[in-house]
Amino acid sequence: MTTNQTIVTLHNGTKIPLYGLDTVDCSGQEVGPLIKEALENGIRHVATAAEYGTENEIGAAIRASGVPRQEIFLTDEIKGINNTDATVRSANASLRRLGADYADLLLLTWNGGESETDPKNSRIYKAWKGLEQLYKSGAAMAIGIVDFSPWQVEYLLHDVEIAPMVCYAGLYPGHPDFEKLVTCTDHNILTMAYAPRTIGNVESSKELVILAEKHQCTPRDIVLQYLKQKNCVVTIRQPVLPSENVTLSEEEMIFLDMMNDYAAE
């Protein structure tokens, strides 16, 4: 994979760029030009989901870009399903829409119950076996989970052949989600962070503005550096790579951990 940014290695040896383009909330008309700009600016990771409804357009934009497919890390989140066969069918349908032979990372949302004793929890094992099949067949270079709480991570790991390589979760200053980070780290699962729709409230906060002025960068650079120093891979909504010339002190990291959660307001 050719890129001008930092590369992180997952526990199965798959390499993933530190920053990726999050295509959430993009219409079919918007997503093509966005991907074109991102790839021209050196971004080599594109993240999408079946529920976004833009897989066809994303696949077309990648093919039209002139960037070889093997140089692009493609993440796709498949629709929530309840059994092994449905998982495989859902993933294969997404790959057809993308016009891709494989995804670099396939993600699955929680498909069980809302508590540890809920009998619906068995669904996640059936769904996960589908991802394991896709991984073994080469349709996915890595597999992972989305927004699993710590107990859900532990529950899944009770009965899997192949452990997730990635957990995709909302993390940002004011919402460090310590327990999830520790749980994933303990099991060698990389946390891939995404920004909530209200991340603008965080970036415009007085705390971020002060730190950005101190480091002579943008508030967005502070957010991304914070996540980088948390050892997270990050997806961003802007088609431009952030500055990597910022380093936050231990005191600043604690300050950002403890600041108000503006995105929740």
Image: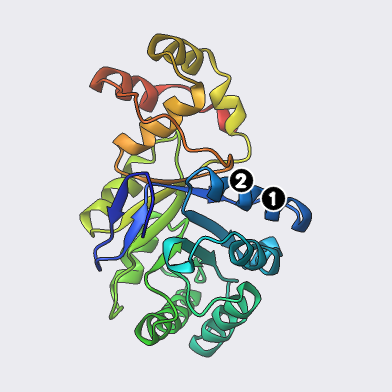
Q: In this view, does 134 lie above or below 60?
A: below
**Residue 173 visible:** no
Mark 1, Cα crowd under 10 Å, few <14 / some 14-19 / many 20+, is: some
- SS label for mark 1: helix
Residue at figure coordinates x 42%, y 14% from the top left: 211
Q: Which amino acid does label 2 sit on?
A: Glu
Q: In this view, does 156 lie above or below 26?
A: below
Q: Where is residue 153 in the image (x, y as percent from the top left)?
A: 35, 62
Q: In this orientation, which residue lies closer to the viewer: 220 or 168?
A: 220
Quadrant (top left, top right, bottom left, bottom right) of the N terminus? bottom left
Q: In this orientation, which residue lies closer to the viewer: 35 or 260?
A: 35
Q: What residue type is labelled 1?
A: Pro
Quadrant (top left, top right, bottom left, bottom right) of the C terminus? top right
Q: Position of residue 176 (x, y in %)?
A: 39, 36
Mark 2, Cα crowd under 10 Å, few <14 / some 14-19 / many 20+, is: some
Residue 80 occupies quadrant: bottom right
Q: In this view, does 92 lie above or below 200?
A: below
Q: In this view, does 25 lie above or below 210?
A: below
The residue carrying mark 1 is: 33
Side of 184 relative to 20 (left or right)? left
**Residue 165 visible:** yes
Residue 166 occupies quadrant: bottom left
Q: Which mark, residue 37?
A: 2
Q: Position of residue 89 (x, y in %)?
A: 58, 86
Q: Where is residue 228 in the image (x, y as percent from the top left)?
A: 34, 38
